[in-house]
């Protein structure tokens, strides 16, 4: 059974950085490399939105508000996804989820305070 566990969230001040990690278990490394991956977030009172996604053989896509600040990366040896978030703003406050294929994690909270 595939399980995704996010970590790395927390409370930071505007302008600071965080790196989120998503550890994937229950699948072989080969299967991991064949999956579309992504990070999503849901801010209070808002719908879930895509933050960054990466498919096999395609470029990573980012929502406009994070372009140039966030970077999605993947370690295909450790079956792990990362989201490096720099220059955070209060608008980035949300519950962040990782996805792998059709599987989802439980989320990790990111709070950015002034």
Image: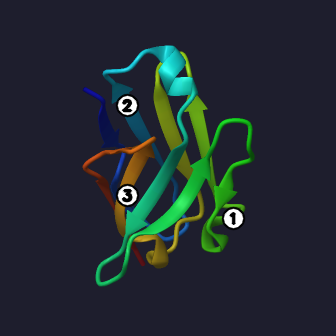
User: Which label belongs to residue 22?
Assistant: none
Mark 1 and mark 3 in contact? Answer it, CB < 8 Å: no
Label 2 residue SS: strand
Label 2 crowd (10 A; few <14 / some 14-19 / many >=20): some
Residue 65 in view: yes
Residue 102 image point, x, y percent: 39, 45
Please name the residue shown 33% across and 42% down the image.
6
Quarter of the image where the N terminus is located: top left
* Residue matched to label 2: 23
Residue 43 image point, x, y percent: 35, 75
Please name the residue shown 29% across and 52% down the image.
107
Relative to 30, is 114 on the left or the right? left
Determine which quarter of the picture holds residue 101. top left
Q: Could you tell me how far apart the alpha carbons at marks 2 and 3 are, in whole angstroms?
A: 14 Å
Q: Out of 9 and 31, give the one closest to the viewer.
A: 31
Label 1 crowd (10 A; few <14 / some 14-19 / many >=20): few
Residue 75 against residue 36 in the figure, above or below: above
Label 1 residue SS: loop
Residue 66 against residue 101 in the figure, above or below: below
Q: Out of 62 and 93, give the one closest to the viewer.
A: 62
Q: Could you tell me how far apart the alpha carbons at marks 1 and 2 are, in whole angstroms?
A: 24 Å
* Residue matched to label 1: 67
Residue 111 in view: no
Residue 95 image point, x, y percent: 32, 63
What coloring was used for the rendering? rainbow
* Residue matched to label 3: 96
Q: Out of 21 and 42, give the one closest to the viewer.
A: 42
Please name the residue shown 62% across and 68% down the image.
63
Q: Counting residues from the N terminus, which is met first, the one under dot 1 or under dot 2?
A: 2
Label 3 crowd (10 A; few <14 / some 14-19 / many >=20): many
Q: Out of 16 and 96, give the one closest to the viewer.
A: 96
């Amino acid at each position: 059974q595939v399980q995704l566990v996010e970590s790395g969230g927390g409370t930071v001040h505007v302008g600071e950085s965080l790196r989120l990690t998503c550890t994937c278990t229950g699948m072989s490394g080969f299967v991991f490399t064949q999956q579309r991956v992504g990070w999503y977030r849901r801010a209070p009172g808002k719908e879930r939105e895509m933050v960054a996604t990466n498919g096999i053989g395609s470029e990573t896509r980012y929502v406009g508000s994070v372009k140039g600040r966030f970077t999605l990366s993947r370690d295909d040896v450790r079956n792990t996804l990362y989201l490096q978030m720099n220059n955070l703003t209060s608008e980035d406050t949300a519950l962040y989820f990782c996805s792998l294929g059709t599987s989802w994690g439980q989320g990790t909270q990111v709070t950015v305070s002034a």
